[in-house]
Image: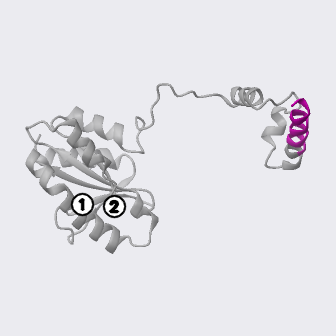
C-alpha cells in the first residue's frame, strides 16, 4: 500500500475512538501523533517503515528521539500519560520479518509499548490495530471469557465463598449503603467456618 493510503486508513480508524491528531514540527521523524481528547489515557506515535532493513536499523533511534525525548521528556513530563504511549511500527516493506524479530521489538519495554502493524494490506492493518490497541473490541479475548449476569455472579459468589442463605441479593446490592449488615454476616460466617474446623 502507498504511505498516503496507510496514513488515511490509520487516521480514519483512530479518529473513531475519539483520538485527535496533533501536529508537532519539533519531532524529527513523524510530525504528528494521536492522543485522547482528555490528554490522559493514550498517546500513539505512528511511523511507516518501507523496508526490513529500515525497521531493524531505525526503530530504536526513532523511539529515543521522538518518543523518549520529545513526547515523554518535553511535552508530557510529570504526567501519567507518558506511561501509556504506543509506538506503532507500521511495516510496509516487501520482505517478511521473522516472528522472533517482531517479538524482540514488541517485548522491549523502554519508554513505550511497541506494536508491530503489518501494513501490506488493508485487512492486515485493521486486524493488527483491532487486536493490539487496548481500546478496541478485539483487544480483550472474548473466547473463554465467562460473562455472568449479576444474579449468576451472586450465586457463584455464595457457592465459592461458602456463604449461606443469609446473604441475600438485597444485602449485596445495599453493601455500600449498609456495610454494617454485610460486615455482621461475614463475621458470623467466619465464626461458623472456624467452628467447623
At 42% from the left edge and 62% from the top edge, which residue is drawn? 81
> Would residue 195 be visible to someone looking at this image?
yes
Asked if disc 2 and disc 1 are in contact, CB closer than 8 Å, the reply is yes
Q: Which residue is under mark 2?
A: 111
> Would residue 30 be visible to someone looking at this image?
no
Question: Element at badge 2?
Answer: loop
Mark linked to residue 63: 1
Disc 1 crowd, CA 10 A, few/some/many (<14, 14-19, 20+): many
Q: Earlier along the polypeptide chain: callout 2 or callout 1?
A: 1
At 85% from the left edge and 41% from the top edge, which residue is drawn? 186
> Magenta segment, principal secondary structure?
helix
Question: Element at badge 1?
Answer: helix
Query: How much space separates mark 2 and mark 1, taking CA atoms?
Result: 8 Å
Span colored in magenta = 184-197
Residue 28: quarter of image: bottom left
Q: Nearer the viewer, residue 148 or 164?
A: 164
Please check the rendered image and state whether residue 117 is part of the magenta-colored stretch, yes or no: no
Residue 148: quarter of image: top right
Disc 2 crowd, CA 10 A, few/some/many (<14, 14-19, 20+): some
In which quadrant is the N terminus drawn?
Answer: top left
Amino acid at each position: 500500500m502507498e504511505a498516503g493510503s496507510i496514513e488515511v486508513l490509520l487516521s480514519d480508524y483512530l479518529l473513531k475512538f475519539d483520538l485527535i491528531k496533533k501536529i508537532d514540527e519539533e519531532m524529527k521523524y513523524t510530525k504528528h501523533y494521536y492522543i485522547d481528547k482528555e490528554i490522559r489515557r493514550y498517546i500513539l506515535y505512528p511511523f511507516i517503515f518501507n523496508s526490513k532493513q529500515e525497521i531493524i536499523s531505525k526503530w530504536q533511534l526513532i523511539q529515543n528521539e521522538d518518543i523518549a525525548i520529545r513526547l515523554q521528556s518535553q511535552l508530557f513530563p510529570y504526567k501519567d500519560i507518558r506511561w501509556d504511549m504506543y509506538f506503532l511500527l507500521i511495516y510496509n516493506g516487501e520482505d517478511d520479518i521473522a516472528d522472533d524479530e517482531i517479538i524482540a521489538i514488541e517485548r522491549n519495554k523502554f519508554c513505550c509499548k511497541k506494536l508491530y502493524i503489518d501494513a501490506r494490506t488493508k485487512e492486515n492493518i485493521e486486524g493488527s490495530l483491532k487486536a493490539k490497541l487496548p481500546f478496541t473490541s478485539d483487544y480483550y479475548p472474548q473466547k473463554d471469557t465467562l460473562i455472568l449476569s449479576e444474579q449468576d455472579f451472586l450465586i457463584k459468589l455464595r457457592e465459592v465463598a461458602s456463604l449461606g442463605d443469609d446473604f441475600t441479593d438485597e444485602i449485596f446490592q445495599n453493601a455500600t449503603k449498609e456495610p454494617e449488615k454485610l460486615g455482621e454476616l461475614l463475621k458470623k460466617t467466619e465464626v461458623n467456618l472456624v467452628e467447623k474446623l
